[in-house]
Image: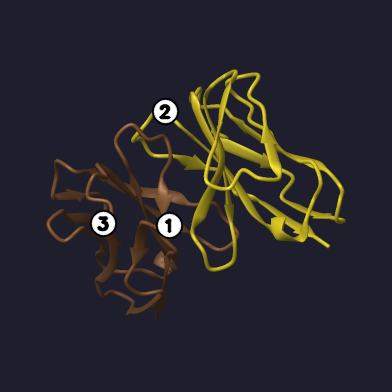
Amino acid sequence: NAGVTQTPKFRILKIGQSMTLQCTQDMNHNYMYWYRQDPGMGLKLIYYSVGAGITDKGEVPNGYNVSRSTTEDFPLRLELAAPSQTSVYFCASSYGQSKPQHFGDGTRLSIL
Amino acid sequence: GESVGLHLPTLSVQEGDNSIINCAYSNSASDYFIWYKQESGKGPQFIIDIRSNMDKRQGQRVTVLLNKTVKHLSLQIAATQPGDSAVYFCAENLPGDYKLSFGAGTTVTVRA
C-alpha cells in the first residue's frame, strides 16, 4: 500500500546544478501536484497535472519544469539550482477535483 | 497574500482535553475545505474534509465546523493524545479550480 512515493528523501546541490525529483503513485489517480514548503509556511503549488500528457503552472513555477508521460509518474526538474530553491518538496495525487490530495513524505533539498 | 490562514500559530493542550484549531478564509466562493495533519519529517496527512453545503462533519475523534457567514473553519479534536502533536493545516478549494490553497499552519503541542 505504497501511495505516493518520492525519491530522493534528501539532496544537497551546488548552485547551477540540475536534478530531477521523482514522484510515483500507485492509486491510479489522474491528478498530480508538486508543492514546496518553506520553514513555518504552508504549501505553495509549483505545477500540477490533470492527466498524462497535460501539465499546468501553479503559483510558483519559475525555475522548475515537469512532465507527465504516464499516469503514475510526475517528475519535477530543476535546471539551474538557486539558493532560493532550498525547500521541502512534496508531491501529491488525487482522484479528482475537490477530493483529498494524498501526499508523499517529501524531498528535502538544500542548494549551497 | 494567502487566502486561507489560521488564527494562532501555536496551541498547547493538556492530554485528555479537547482541542480547537481555527482557520479563517477570505474567499466566500470556496466550496471545499480540508484539514491536514503534518508530523515532523512527514508529508501532510488527510484528516477530514467538508463541502460548503454542510455546516458540520464528524470523523473519528475529529469534528470540522464550517461557518460560511463569517468565513470560519474549525477542527475539534476530542480527548487529545500525545500522538496528536503536529502541525495542522486548513486548505480551501474554489469551484472549478484544481489546486488547494493552504494556510500557514498551527503547531499543536500536547502536554502530558
Q: Is residue B32 above or below residue B2?
A: above
Q: Is residue B108 above or below residue B3?
A: below
Q: Is residue B51 left or right of residue A33?
A: left
Q: Tag 2, which secondary structure? A: loop
Question: Is the residue at mark 1 from the same chain as the one at mark 2?
Answer: no
Residue position marked by numbered label 1 in the rendering:
B37
- The percent coordinates of residue A80 (x first, y second) are 81, 46
In front: A49, or B22?
Answer: A49
Residue at the image point whose x is 15% and y is 53% from the top: B68
The chain identifier of the residue carrying mark 3 reads B
In front: B26, or A43?
Answer: B26
Residue at the image point whose x is 35% and y is 66% from the top: B6
In front: A16, or B33?
Answer: A16
Residue position marked by numbered label 2 in the rendering:
A95
The chain identifier of the residue carrying mark 2 reads A
Nearest to viewer (mark 3 / mark 2): 2
- The percent coordinates of residue A96 (x first, y second) are 39, 28
Q: Quadrant for the C terminus of chain A, please.
A: bottom right
User: In the image, what residue type sits under mark 2?
Assistant: Tyr
User: In the image, what residue type sits under mark 3?
Assistant: Val
Q: Is residue A73 above or below residue B2?
A: above
The colour one sees for chain B in the rendered image is brown
Residue density around tag 2, few if under 14, some if 14–19, many if 20 or more, within 10 Å: some
User: In the image, what residue type sits under mark 1?
Assistant: Lys
Report which quarter residue B22 is drawn in: bottom left
User: What's the mark number on residue B62?
Assistant: 3
Residue at the image point whose x is 57% and y is 21% from the top: A71
> Which comes sooner in the sequence, label 3 or label 1?
1
Q: Is residue A100 above or below residue B72?
A: above
| Chain letter matching colour yellow | A
